[in-house]
Image: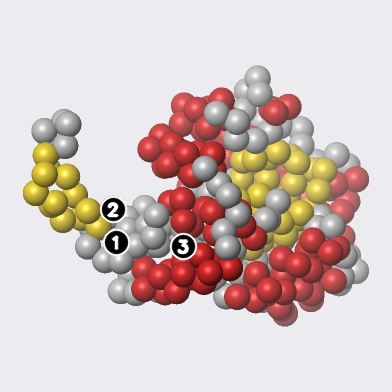
Amino acid sequence: VATLRRAIDAGLNVVDTAPGYEEGYSEQIVAAAVQGVRERLFIIDKIDDLDAPVAPQIEDSLRRLQLDGADAFVFHALSSLETFERLAQPGGGFDQLADCIRAGKARFGGISSHNPDVLIAAIEAGLCDIAMFPVGPFVDQRFIDEVLPLAKERGVGTVCFKTFGAGKLLGDTQGYNQPLQLRPRGKLSSGGETETTAVLPRLRVDECLHYTLTLDPDVALLGLSFPNEQDAAFAAARTFRPLTPAQMDDIRRRAVEARQDKGPC
């Protein structure tokens, strides 16, 4: 809670959560952190079970959030065209979400997806106020070349994640919540400990964030779980200047190297 409040105090104004994050505990953390500052924030929550009725899931999430309504609810990890088509049928999930919006449980609706085809179909069908999808140095280029321009053309909000490739672009991590694999550099830090460095190729925080910001989504959604992560991201944001095409190409090329030998992505 203190870490989230630290980010809010620094100016962060979008918070993203989901019932599946730590089995609802993430929503409870958000509930505690937004007390007294709710009006400053845009809170996004998810509908995790794509096979179950929507309204009870939203009610459960709002109970954990201790809110009457969120700013947006989106279908989480909606990456199957078959599932999308089922939810888009009359009386299906999208209609149920629209009913919840009319009832004041949310202001906007949309999807979070890792499939460009699903995103394009949902945006073209007019079913999204918000689309959440990957935009960073190591993503399927269709997200950047097709989905992002289409969303902007249709007035759909773009909330884009995977700037750091789940952390794999920045160090030797094998995935979420895994420590960096480091080796000594042979120098002592100010605290008397040996400095360390990543073994495998990596990008810098500012390179990754500047890449995403150059592409200009409405929101760059970053993992900011620790104060040092916040400080690195905020420092990079303050120094942002749009990158040149040559700089973008260079970062994209080195991102391929930075992703090697770090597990599936």
Question: Alpha-carbon neighbours of circle 1 within 10 Å: few (<14), some, or many (≥20)?
Answer: many
**Cα–Cα span, label 3 and label 1:** 12 Å
Q: Percent position (x, y) of residue 154?
A: 86, 63
**Which of 136 and 130 lies nearest the eye of the viewer?**
136
Q: Is residue 200 left or right of residue 121?
A: left
Dot 1 falls on a residue whose secondary structure is loop
| Mark closer to the observer (1, 2) | 1
Q: Percent position (x, y) of residue 259?
A: 38, 70
Label whose residue precedes the other's in the sequence (2 or 3): 3
Q: Percent position (x, y) of residue 127?
A: 84, 63
Dot 3 falls on a residue whose secondary structure is loop
Q: Percent position (x, y) of residue 189?
A: 16, 37
**Cα–Cα span, label 1 and label 2:** 8 Å
Query: Which three-letter amino acid code belongs to the residue tagged 3?
Result: Gly
Q: Is residue 225 left or right of residue 27?
A: left
From the image, tell me which residue sits under label 1: 172
Q: Residue shown at 68%/45% (left/top)?
A: 44
Dot 2 falls on a residue whose secondary structure is loop
In the displayed structure, 190 sits above or below 121; it is above
| Mark closer to the observer (2, 3) | 3
From the image, tell me which residue sits under label 2: 179
In the displayed structure, 197 sits above or below 146; it is above
Query: Which three-letter amino acid code belongs to the residue tagged 1?
Result: Asp
Query: Which three-letter amino acid code belongs to the residue tagged 2?
Result: Pro
Quadrant (top left/top right/bottom left/bottom right) for the C terminus: bottom left
Within the image, what quadrant is residue 192 found in?
top left
